[in-house]
Amino acid sequence: MGKDNNPGQDENLAALTQIQQILHEFQIEDVSLFDHEPVLRIQVSDAQFARALQVRETLVERIKPLGYRFVSIDLDES
């Protein structure tokens, strides 16, 4: 039996990879991304939280075109 090819899942994976690259450009590392379409939840460490807030507007501008209507930063890293 062959593997099902889900184009939507492939697109989401590609978008998440791009988002990780965007976050890396802004020195935001060690994040977890959660796709709750149409919401992207970005979980950052306490150490990275202030940096994420500093570049919030730019992150939203760059992430929304990748298919998310809302971009959120998770306040609880646990």
Image (cartoon, helix red, strand yellow):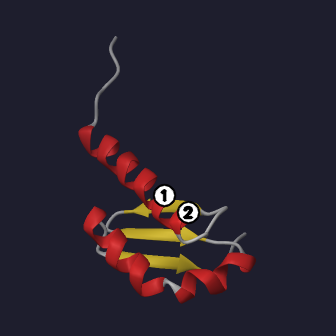
Residue at 30% x, 47% y: name it. 11
Residue 60 lies, in percent from the top left, at 38, 78
Q: Amino acid at mark 1?
A: Gln
Q: Amino acid at mark 2?
A: His
Residue extending farthest to the front is: 25
Within 10 angstroms of label 2, few (less than 14), some, or many (20 or more) residues?
Answer: few
Residue at 29% x, 74% y: name it. 69
Q: CA distance from mark 2 to mark 1?
A: 5 Å
> Would you place residue 71 above or below residue 8 in this image?
below
Judge by depth and name the residue closer to the eye, 23 or 4. 23
**Mark sitting on residue 53:** none
| Secondary structure at numbered mark 1 | helix
Query: Is there CB contact under 8 Å for labels 2 and 1?
Result: yes
Residue 27 lies, in percent from the top left, at 61, 69
Judge by depth and name the residue closer to the eye, 12 or 55. 55
- Quadrant where the N terminus is found in the figure: top left
Judge by depth and name the residue closer to the eye, 59 or 71. 59
Within 10 angstroms of label 1, few (less than 14), some, or many (20 or more) residues?
Answer: some
Instruction: Provide the residue designation for mark 2.
Output: 24
Instruction: Provide the residue designation for mark 1.
Output: 21
Q: Is residue 75 visible?
A: no
Horizontal side of 61 relative to 51 (left or right) equals left
Horizontal side of 56 relative to 77 (left or right) equals left
Residue at 72% x, 69% y: name it. 78
> Would you place residue 28 above or below residue 3 in this image?
below
Residue at 46% x, 64% y: name it. 22
Q: Is residue 23 visible?
A: yes
Instruction: Report the number of numbered marks.
Output: 2
Residue extending farthest to the top is: 1
Residue 43 lies, in percent from the top left, at 60, 70
